[in-house]
Amino acid sequence: MTQKPDQCLGEWIDREALAEAMIPLIGQLYRNNNVAITLYGRSLINRSVIDLLKGHRFTRHRQADEVELSVQETFPLLKTLSELKLGPATIDLGRLTVKFKEEGNGRSVEAFLREELADVIGKQGSSDRKGRDIVLYGFGRIGRLLARIMVEKTGGGEGLRLRAIVVRKGADNDLSKRASLLRRDSVHGSFDGTIIVDEENSNLLINGNLVHVIYSNDPSTVDYTQYGINNALVVDNTGKWRDAEGLSLHLKCPGVDRVILTAPGKGALKNIVHGINHGTITDEDKIVTAASCTTNAIVPVLKALNDKYGIVNGHVETVHSYTNDQNLIDNFHKGNRRGRSAALNMVITETGAAKAVAKALPELAGKLTGNAIRVPTPNVSMAILNLNLEKATDREEVNEYLRHMALYSDLHEQIDFVNSPEVVSSDFVGSRYAGVVDAEATICHDNRVVLYVWYDNEFGYSCQVVRVLEEMAGVKPADFPRA
């Protein structure tokens, strides 16, 4: 039946009203209960009415029948969640709603939620978790994105608490310049909040988070306890020290408990890919690394494939955006080819991602080769996985399997899935996943499969680092619905 203009507008107004009613519920759950509401991995905190409606529309790409969720379906669950006095948790409203539709079995919304979230119901204010102090050592591309994510996730203060940034002083107006770089980003847009610069005390007040800016050239010389910082996790973003000897300099500082490196580590340091081997972190591990952006992007997909089909061998080709290490115009560089203009050339370079896979997935040791091509884009990269499998499959089967893994498995925070024939690299700026499988590009013939995996090598990787930090700090909230 043909829809009428007034009918379409009336339905839209009704949806707007429900979305508007959802906003305070989401905010109250976040600030009062430390409950983060997402929609298929997309945070709904501090979002507008239009953001919520677009998010619901986006969910059609996550369903086999490509039917979007409606606010009429999700609102009753959200309203009930707000009444259950929940303890800290991350709740995916999209996945929860679909599970209720498929497994509700005639139960009321409240009965379903009471069973599904039994572990955190009635736990409001009873958590013994305390916020953990975080220090960012270095404040470049990854450091600033980590700051954005941690400030966004402050909630009631029981999680990660950004307390200090340590940098080398670059100018008399260094503090205001650092604040400006955090406030404005050519790739990721404006910071969502307020930043107040306190030059006299060398502080930044970022959405209510008081952050000390400390100037130092030596990681072993800062006494963090002078700033009220204790038992802190230091995130080394500089990449200058990559082995245990160098990174242990941080541990000499009063107030520091543990260190994480945002780059592949050397020697016996554990390279952690969250979702894969974060369970191997022990209290005795004073230094760990978060591996590389490419390793984080490919390992979850490789694990999923290896678990179901078995991987005989393969090659990983990375098409990677240029980085700050390259030259804008031709100039001397100690690395091969990297001296040529990053903005004008595709540059073949090395990558250790294929070898690094074995540190997270030992069963794939020696099975993969790898190479990389730097291309003239500022962000978002792609990994092409050309694999020989032990079991034959077809394109439809492998795509459906990966779609299911993205939605319902323990890897749902790491793997995303898209099946649009029109997506390009800029569509994945700001993706919070380690990697996004492009289903339209999948090639499969018998036991050979070629997969294309997009990843925001800045933001997606930073989200993985934060997940590792939450694990090390013991503040990662429970995740619902259960995989």
Image (cartoon, rainbow, N blue to C red):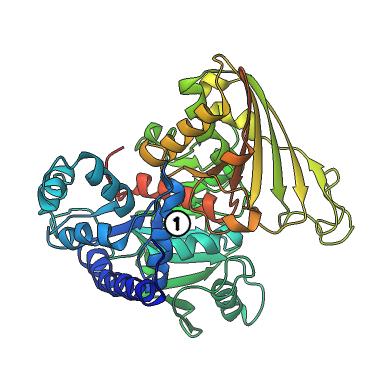
Q: Quadrant of the C terminus?
A: top left
Residue 441 vs residue 283: left or right? right
Q: Position of residue 324 (x, y in %)?
A: 71, 58
Residue 408 vs residue 456: left or right? left
Which one is in front, 327 or 55? 55
Q: Dot 1: within a 10 Å radius of its alpha carbon, few (fewer than 14), some, or many (20 or more) residues?
A: some
- Which residue is at a point 65% across and 44% down the rendered structure image? 382
Which one is in front, 417 or 214? 417
- Which residue is at a point 22% across and 60% down the rendered structure image? 78
User: Residue 436 falls in which quadrant of the image?
Assistant: top right
Q: Is residue 316 above or below residue 237?
A: above
Q: Position of residue 389 (x, y in %)?
A: 58, 18
User: Residue 225 falls in which quadrant of the image?
Assistant: bottom left
Residue 376 vs residue 38: left or right? right
Q: Position of residue 128 (x, y in %)?
A: 18, 53
Q: Tell me, yes or no, if residue 416 can be seen here.
A: yes
- Which residue is at a point 70% across and 47% down the rendered structure image? 320
Residue 448 vs residue 194: left or right? right
| Residue under numbered circle 1 | 58
Q: Position of residue 93 (x, y in %)?
A: 29, 54
Disc 1 residue type? Phe
Q: Residue reaching furthest top?
A: 390
Secondary structure at numbered mark 1? helix
- Which residue is at a point 50% across and 27% down the rendered structure image? 397
Q: Residue reaching furthest front?
A: 1
Q: Is residue 190 above or below residue 436?
A: below
Which one is in front, 164 or 310? 310
Q: Tell me, yes or no, if residue 478 can be seen here.
A: no
